[in-house]
Amino acid sequence: MRRAARVLGAVFRNRDLRRVELAFVGFNSAEWGVWIAMLVYAYEQGGATTAGIVAAIQLVPAGLAAPLGSALADRFPPVRVLVFGYVAQAASMGATAIVLLVADMPYLAYALAAVAATAVTITRPTQSALVPALARSPDELTATNVVSGWIESLSVLLAPALTGVILGFSGPGTVFAVMAVVAFASGVLVGGVHGPGAPVVAGDARPMDEITAGFRVLKEEPGPRLLVGLLAAQFVAIGALDVLYVVLAIGVLELGQSGAGYLNAAFGAGGVLGIGATVLLVGRRRLLGPLVAGVAAWCAALAVLGAWPTKLSAFVLFAAAGGARSLVDVTGRTLLQRTARPEVLARVFGVLEGLTMAALAIGSLLTPALVAIAGAKAALFGLAVLLPVALAVFGRQLRDVDRRADVPVVEISLLRNIRIFSPLGAPELEALARSLEPVEAAAGAAVVREGDPGDLFYAVADGELEVTQNGRSLRRLGRGDVFGEIALLQEIPRTATVTALSPAHLYSLEKEPFLAAVTGHPQSTREATTLVRDRLETLGA
């Protein structure tokens, strides 16, 4: 528990990550709440077949739109894109609530729910591309992924439980109304994040090329392709479980319609109980072992449930499966962030989001057929063998991906948002990021002193620093700011003193790679010249 508290504290001390993660609580709660409510509503209209069809109606357009929506985060400031996504979700959920509460129009309700599901696809790809730019170190990025996994699990526990309570005394329309308010609150939270600006896009980049960039990466690079495929495959099982919750609760275990929410909540409770396992991922270089362990535990729980479906075993085994699934998802997404190139990271996650929707639809559509042919027990057995087969086929490739997954995504994200480096291409940025050295400065410590020789360039990852000359304060520095470039470019002593006002985390870059990067690209040279001129004017030189 102490280690879990340290991980949580490390993430929540970062103001921007704290707001993003709290908004993510609302996102997951709204996503799961309205999903369950609509499946229950559809089941009441026409049984399991209608529930499966309505699930597909929501998922297919969402899956097709996901790659398009993800391109926004690589084109516009990701914080704005995230806010837009939350507002769109709130608006569409609110419209669905109005139809369910005041009109008897099922088909319109299904259509509006599909709009809400499409808006949902904006959040995860955008957040996956944003958090590396907000994290201050690689371990903090992994810790953020772990916390996101906890939040997803906790939301799967609380949102279905709340949904079950609301369904018990009211109906699906009330669920949609409540979750619309929750989604809007998430948008307000994210609106206060100080995130990076719009990524630099090549002037000749065509919109269609940007939209399809994620697909090209998966076509050309086997590592991201394999991880996206594995992560998508787990959602075939989740889509099937979404329908099986209803079938088991009403048709097998006789728990009533609210029982579907409670079974789903048990799955989420398992994710919360699995916190101890995901904490161990922080600082861990190799992730294949936890991934395999998570798959094995998840599938074993489903197989045992298929053989022994009682009320008690259902809650216990769904909890076990939920904990294992969280481990699979966090390790897989962290590996993907380490493997995919940062400049197309949002679009790769957008493809994953689209495939996730398609996988959920496949699982939702296959389950009624499996239940009709062989029963709910056989359907659970079928799900239990899905991921182990994938691991057996692609295990060697996964081991190679795990061994090579060391892209410095946090450092690259920091460099991409520094004006003099943003024009550089992906290979140059990655090479430069690998040359960075972390530097810790205690409060009150002078990082550089006026008049000293200059041999290092510095970028601020976290903390606050003050620039002074002859004892006169010139400016304050924070995350994303840089200093030390004048001494390197003009070959003169340090022109000012930089002192840490709070504990600061910096990255230093030696003179040779700095000059090679800046002078090797015309746009970077112009940006550096402008920066030096502005700084010298401030200094009065």
Image (cartoon, rainbow, N blue to C red):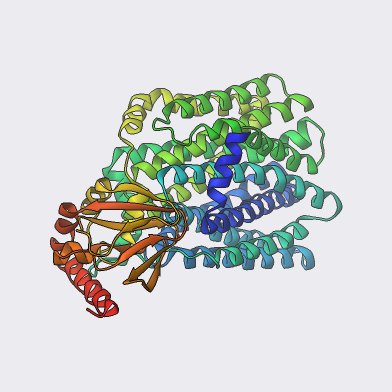
- Looking at the image, residue 356 sits to the left or right of residue 242; the answer is left
How many discs mark residues in the rendered view? Answer: 0
Q: Nearer the viewer, residue 180 or 146?
A: 146
Residue 284 percent location from the top left of the image = 43, 32
For the point 68% across and 63% down, which residue is it? 180
- Quadrant of the image occupied by residue 247: top right
The percent coordinates of residue 34 (x first, y second) are: 68, 54
The front one of 135 and 6 is 6
Query: Which quadrant of the rendered structure holds the C terminus?
Result: bottom left
In this image, 197 relative to 376: left or right?
left
User: Residue 475 or 293: which is nearer the viewer?
Assistant: 475
**Image quadrant occupied by the N terminus:** top right
Residue 463 is at least partly visible in this image: yes
Determine the residue positioned at 59% across, 22% down: 300
> x and y percent of residue 51 in the render?
67, 46
Q: Position of residue 411 (x, y in %)?
A: 34, 51
Q: Residue furthest right?
A: 169
In-image side of 71 versus 483 (left or right): right
Give the residue at x 59% y 67%: 87
Can you say whether 168 is above or below 486 in the image?
Answer: above
State whether residue 369 appears in this view: no
- Residue drawn 31% across and 71% down? 469
Please determine whether, in this image, residue 121 is positioned above or below residue 340: below
